[in-house]
Image (spheres, rainbow, N blue to C red):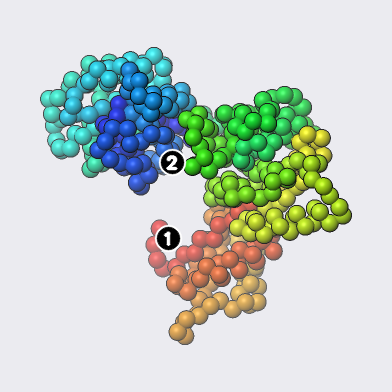
Amino acid sequence: MAKPIIAIVGRPNVGKSTLFNKLVGQRLSIVKDTPGVTRDRIYSPCEWRGKEVMLVDTGGIEPYSNDVILSQMRRQAQLAIESADVIVLVTDLRTGVTANDQEVASMLLKSGKPVVLCVNKVDTIGDVPPEYYEFYNLGLGDPIPVSSVHGHGTGDLLDACFEHIDFENREEYDEEYIKVAIIGKPNVGKSSLVNRMTGQERAIVSNIAGTTRDATDSILENEHGKYVLIDTAGIRRKSRVDDDIEKYSVLRAYMAVDRADVCLIVIDATEGFTEQDSKVAGYAHEQGKASIVVINKWDAVEKDGKTMDEYRKKLENDFSFMSYVPFIFISALTGQRVDKLYDLINYVCEQNARRISTGMLNDMLAYATARVQPPSDKGKRLRLFYITQASTKPPAFVIFCNSLDLFHFSYQRYLENQIRETFGLDGTPIRIIPRERGKDSK
């Protein structure tokens, strides 16, 4: 499900980044008492009352500035506003309503998006100071008094934002559709693959890296099933993301992964595995998504009888952190093996959503511990009492033990391998969650 986007905007130096950091619970945005420190958008999930949104922190908006950096910041903020579900306009109690605040408020009203007005730096508890009422002049409804430093009022702010979001009807497609995100660094043939699978020129295809600026959806139905193909802009290294539109493309690609059931990690066969491929794949792995590594442009590689096996062995080493992931060699240009993708997508999607009975899991655990004894330390041995599956997408298994200190990572990895050896679970990450019996499960 796509997370709703809340964009935090306002003129420079009103405390947007401090508020952002307080809401997400960690220091992601640079905070400094100098206008213009946050020059690009920072984004992070934020959970409140059991529901999750994506917060986007923007650079300050200076409506009439001719400064190059400030004008780029203004463009970035406008991009965030265009895709946001709710916009939080942050103002500063200490400076009062400024001409820039009025211009930004006017711009937001013209956008037609829901706007929540935040009056920041209200650091005292109790009745709001008289200066607070001045902000009604912006015409954005009741201002929410907040102290981003101390956290006062942040819950009221999120409540006000959530009133404008329909969390019940955010799934765009029926469950029978498998949502497939096609991700990878720029110019590996993602759009060409979408066009080959859909049989039409759905996405612009160019050999210029970064042609696809946004995540676009294509609905596909065939004899294999029903799919939503999400073509994304290529994910680049942060240091290489210079253009403001490119920076926003990274956010769209990450959010496409969040929406997806299956990720196709597309690699250029002529270039091979790169560090950026590992970052792209790593994000899909962290999000618990079923994944397939698609080696595109296989027609452009000079081959003999051993080429594919040698290439596969190298990839297995490169993707050692995702040992479960299957590989498929295709050519989006000629259509070679593209038809085989559908069965593989269906299979890894089923594995990602698979549920295993507790009885079968405990039979596996008994066999695994008999085969390789759990570790011990200073005469005390790790005892594993019980295993059960807690959730799917990805499959997560809770194992109850007598001591978390003895439950070393290496033995957890061994048990993960035993689960895969017994039940398959190809193409999907799995989670091992150790719990010490008798302790709070939290």
Do residues under tags 1 and 2 come within 8 Å of each other at their CB atoms? no
The image quadrant that residue 202 belongs to is top right
- Please tell me which residue is depicted at 75% across the width and 41% down the height of the picture: 297
Q: Is residue 316 above or below residue 292?
A: below
Q: Is residue 135 above or below residue 442?
A: above
- Residue 236 placement (x, y as % from top left): 55, 40
- Residue 376 placement (x, y as % from top left): 50, 80
In the displayed structure image, the side of residue 300 where residue 249 appears, left or right: left
- Please tell me which residue is depicted at 41% across the width and 17% down the height of the picture: 111
Residue 302 seen in render: yes
| Disc 1 versus disc 2: nearer the observer | 2
Give the CA separation, mark 1 to mark 2. Answer: 24 Å
State the residue position of label 1: 441
Is tag 1's residue or tag 2's residue first in the polypeptide sequence?
2
In the picture, which quadrant includes the C terminus?
Answer: bottom left
In the displayed structure image, the side of residue 336 where residue 8 appears, left or right: left
Residue 167 seen in render: no
Disc 1 residue crowd, few under 14, some 14–19, many 20+, Cα 10 Å = few
Give the amino acid at mark 2.
Pro
The image quadrant that residue 203 belongs to is top right
* SS for callout 2: strand
- Residue 2 placement (x, y as % from top left): 52, 34
- Residue 266 placement (x, y as % from top left): 67, 42
In the picture, which quadrant includes the N terminus?
Answer: top right
